[in-house]
Image (cartoon, rainbow, N blue to C red):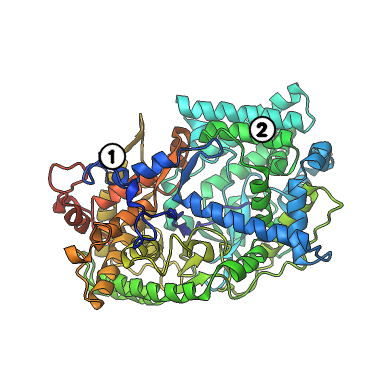
Amino acid sequence: MNFKNIAMACVAVATLSSCSNSSALKCINTAYLSDSIAPGEDFYGYVNRGWQKAHPLTDEYSRFGQFNVLNDAAEQHVKDIVLSLAESNPKEGTVAFKVSTVYSLAMDSVRRNEEGAKPILADLKKIEQFPADKMEDLFMWMHKNYASPFFGAGPMEDLNNSSEYAMYVSGVSLGMGDRDYYLLDDEANTKVRNAYRTLIETQMKNAGYNEADAKRIVENVLKVETSLAEETWTREESRDMGKMNNVRSAEELAKMYPQVNWSRFFSETMGIELPKSVIVTEINTVKRGVDLLSSLSEREIKDYYLWEYVSNASSMLSDAFTNANFEYAKVTTGVKEQRPRWKRALAATEGALGEAIGQLYVEKYFPESSKKYMLELVENLRTSLGEHIQNLTWMSDSTKANALKKLAAFTVKIGYPDKWKDYSSMNIDPAKSYYENMHEVAMWHQADTYSKWGKPVDKTEWGMTPQTVNAYYNPMANEIVFPAAILQAPFFDPNATDAENYGGIGVVIGHEMTHGFDDQGRNFDEKGNMVNWWTDADLQAFTELTQKLVAQFDAVEVLPGLHANGQYTLGENIADQGGLRVSYTAFLESQKKKGIDVNSESAKVAGFTPTQLFYINFANIWAGNIRDEEARRLTIQDVHSLAENRVNVTLRNITPFFEAFGIKAGDKLYLAPEDQVIIW
């Protein structure tokens, strides 16, 4: 099952360097500050140029930043946990046995290379040998067993009643990820498309097909996926929540897409009766998929299925398959060296049994004191955001009341789930191949998802594991979530200055809170239901402000001829700005209670006022290097702006930042008050 979800808004947050040249600073190394770049010309460069020089990109990375520093540390901790489980000689059937077995199978390159394509040959043969009059059976088998050709479907929280699950029918995910790769003929997109052609041909040869058949499969796959791309939403359309909420009865679904036996589809792929209603998120995209299903030749459909199967299986087969994937990644991201096998094996193991590992991770690496500190910090930020809402000049009192109601209802999850997943029914057998076991894992997770149908939504469930270095806001639960791995030194340190913590984790908290009121989050009420709680005038004012912010980012040229996409990144840009504003207000209040003037000489640490340190730390968390290929790919596919723009463009709208560093008219980053965009 691979249907399109409504994505949770994530911070994709970076982390801080552990070294410091001042005993009073725990997160900032002032030696990295540039003497040759003025804060008002390029604040990102002023703060981070030294870090960039000290951390040149190695061949393994297409980008490397503070995020990777902490992620690497968490990864090493997880590796230690997994290896210790293997050394304990765990009893067969236990979670420890399952974790250590998956990792061991992933690491066994000798066995995987000896097996080659053997683990999938029976299924490829099955696809090839399905008779022409049984193509519907083959379609059902594909959806049940491995992929989601032509369209996707599955249960998720109901947009209109978040306490229940709705059944969603959605457009299919494209092999290259974005429609532009298929439809635009400029040099950059053509280069990626040619690399994708090479990938398909190489992988089909690895699977045992001769050159002629492999080339035929390439053409048929590109024919199908290009046709699907023509009706796939643009990046900007994909952020329109209202456009997704297309509730249709079972009868209407059958009339819209009569080529599909929907009763059989739900019965055979999910084991459930035909739902009384579904939500069709992309009506025309699904229609194109269904039309292709009924109009393509048997050969074209089978070739498309063959590639779906091989593509999904490739990372679990021999080095020939994983090396081919890497050759494609080199073109799309600019990376020069494949990640070490142990890192790839560890990622697969976490994908299989993430919460089982997470439970051990928090026991060893997450102190409860951090959770208590964070809860207090969150409440400070909640109070601050409430003040911001109350003081808005563009919003009416009635809409403010609804916004405050939603803010008060935020659920806060910190560290780890209260209830852990039960993996006892997952079967892991070391006698079987790595691929066979991972297929079993995929089927287990698919069954786990389908089992939710007809039950109340489990509000305790987490969308990330505790060892994930990130955070998120879930609009349909109205919750903000901070996994344990992001809540540790040096990013979050109870012994750091308040300026560092508020400029770091405080901004992250404010970022996630603001997602509840960005261009997508604003569509949901305090219960997580898609309800319009805005007056028409307030919505118009909000839209006018957001379009000004869009224009600020659109004006940035990322690479020659490639501009940032302000509309696609709007939600994250709103959250970045909101996080900064809200955290700074909370920071000021915390210092006021302590009798500290944040801009005074007497309060300086390492030669900087607390306010300056607040903004330095904010820029510091985004320090990093990136290859041009990866910058292009992220600009096309990522809802987050590139790190430099998250800092420089966002700060142009923050007057206290100008005051802290003496930035004035004529400086590159300066923006007159009347041109600044203040949303939350």
Mark 2 packing: few (<14 Cα in 10 Å), some, or many (20+)? some
Q: Name the residue under label 2.
A: 324
Residue at the farthest top position: 212
Which amino acid, mark 2? Ala
Image side of residue 219 versus residue 4, left or right: right
Q: Where residue 490 appears, x then y in whole percent?
A: 44, 60
> Can you give x and y, in whole percent of width and height, for residue 385 in the image?
31, 70
Q: In this view, does 120 lie above or below 83?
A: above
In the rendered structure, the answer to whether residue 354 lies left or right of residue 370 reads: right
> Please, which residue is most extreme toward the right here?
431
Front residue of 123 and 250: 123
Q: Name the residue under label 1.
A: 555
Q: Residue at the location (30% across, 66% down)?
A: 582
The amino acid sitting under disc 1 is Ala
Instruction: Tell me the element at label 1.
Output: loop
In the rendered image, residue 133, in percent from the top left (x then y), is placed at 81, 41
